[in-house]
Amino acid sequence: MKKVLIAVVLLSPFLVCDPYPTGSVQPDYYTVTGLPASIPSSNIPGHNATYGFKLDIGSLPPGSWTVKANACKKASASWPVGSCSADSNPLSLSPTPQPSSPQAPRLVP
């Protein structure tokens, strides 16, 4: 008899962007606007070859959110003026609402 192991991994949803092509100017960091203050959304470091950035939005509260992102370059000797790109196209998010709190918890005999 074969044993089957089933693993369930709960992962947060992530907001990501595509990586920049090799040979193009690579951003130093990203900013995202339109999220609540509870989600850090400025100075997001670049991620890796899979994504330009990867932002955990698992704690995004219910509601409707319209987010935009910018790629930014810090000032340096080879890039004298720090600057950010124009806004990305907007992305609308509507997380699944959470259940309401239990009503009237109490002890019964």
Image (cartoon, rainbow, N blue to C red):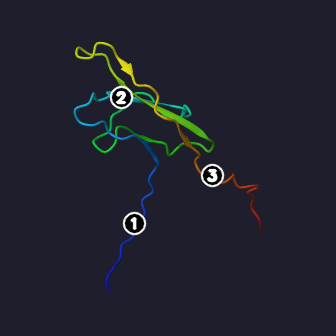
Q: Amino acid at mark 2?
A: Tyr
**Residue at image coords 73%, 57%:** 105
Question: What SS does tag 1 mark?
Answer: loop
The residue wearing badge 1 is 7
Q: Amino acid at mark 1?
A: Ala
Is the C terminus in the top left, top right, bottom left or bottom right quadrant?
bottom right
Tell me the tag on residue 97. none
Residue 2 in percent (x, y) is at 31, 82
Q: CA distance from mark 3 to mark 1?
A: 24 Å
In the displayed structure image, the side of residue 79 where residue 66 appears, left or right? right
The residue wearing badge 3 is 98
**Residue at image coords 33%, 13%:** 81
Is the N terminus in the top left, top right, bottom left or bottom right quadrant?
bottom left
Sequence-wise, the earlier of marks 3 and 1 is 1
Q: CA distance from mark 1 to mark 2?
A: 35 Å
Question: What SS does tag 3 mark?
Answer: loop
Q: Answer few, some or many: residues within 10 Å of disc 3's Cα (few below 14, many 20 plus, some between 14 and 19).
A: few
**Residue at image coords 34%, 17%:** 82
Mark 2 and mark 3 residues within 8 Å of each other at the beta carbon: no
Q: CA distance from mark 2 to mark 3?
A: 32 Å
Q: Nearer the viewer, mark 1 or mark 2?
A: 2
Tell me the tag on residue 29. 2
Q: Amino acid at mark 3?
A: Gln
Sequence-wise, the earlier of marks 2 and 3 is 2
Q: Nearer the viewer, mark 2 or mark 3?
A: 2
Near-viewer residue (10 or 81): 81
In the displayed structure image, the side of residue 108 where residue 99 appears, left or right? left
